[in-house]
Image (tube, rainbow, N blue to C red):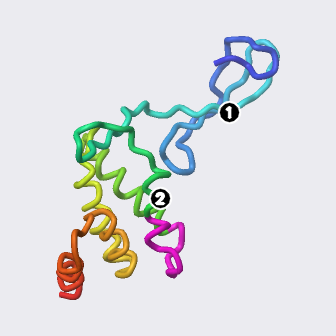
Amino acid sequence: MRCPKCGCEESKVVDSRPSESNDAIRRRRECVRCGTRFTTYERREEMPLLVVKKDGHKETFERGKLMRGLVAATIKRDVPMEKLDGLIDEIVSELRDNGMSEVDSQDLGKMVLQRLADVDKVAYVRFASVYRDFKDVDEFSEELRSLAR
């Protein structure tokens, strides 16, 4: 690790502990040349998560894209952004915990809907109307009936 003050490539670790969010190791280092102390974070390198679309092409999972869809579904609803952020965290954690590097867009949509049904029913219907691409009013009505059960 290069010293931010003098550029020396040698440093010693003074302290090491998990970061506040437990997703990295926080290390306090000291430059052996000038004595400057600085902090580094060591994180596990993760493979990118890919989403397989309906037509078969793959794209990198974008947290922001999913968040935009959730925000659109919850507009004018009393759903805090922290709740939506937590919902996305749960989904990403579940996929990572299951060792998945690819997820079908339909499966991803189902995971979102399962969680959204517990958060806000109106947001669920809004998200489902885009995700499921209802062809007519009957399909939409059937979804509402299944939600009411």
Q: Is residue 51 magenta?
A: no
Q: Which amino acid does label 1 sit on?
A: Thr
Circle 2: element type: helix
Asked if 86 appears above or below 14 in the picture, the reply is below
The disc placed on residue 64 is none
Q: Quadrant of the C terminus?
A: bottom left
The image position of residue 131, as x and y in percent, is 30, 62
Front-most of residues 15 and 88 = 88
Asked if 86 appears above or below 139 in the picture, the reply is above
Mark 2 sits on what residue? 67
Q: In this view, does 6 lie to the left or right of 135?
A: right
The image position of residue 24, as x and y in percent, is 51, 39
Q: In which quarter of the image is residue 132?
A: bottom left
Q: Residue, x 29% and y 59% (percent of image)?
A: 109
* Disc nearest the viewer among 1 and 2: 2
Asked if 38 appears above or below 5 in the picture, the reply is below
Mark 1 sits on what residue? 39
Q: In which quarter of the image is the N terminus?
A: top right
The image position of residue 72, as x and y in percent, is 48, 68
Question: In the image, which residues are magenta?
Answer: 70-82
Of mark 1 and mark 2, the one earlier in the sequence is 1
Q: Distance between the residues labelled 1 and 2?
A: 31 Å
Q: What residue type is labelled 2?
A: Met
Q: Is residue 29 left or right of residue 132?
A: right
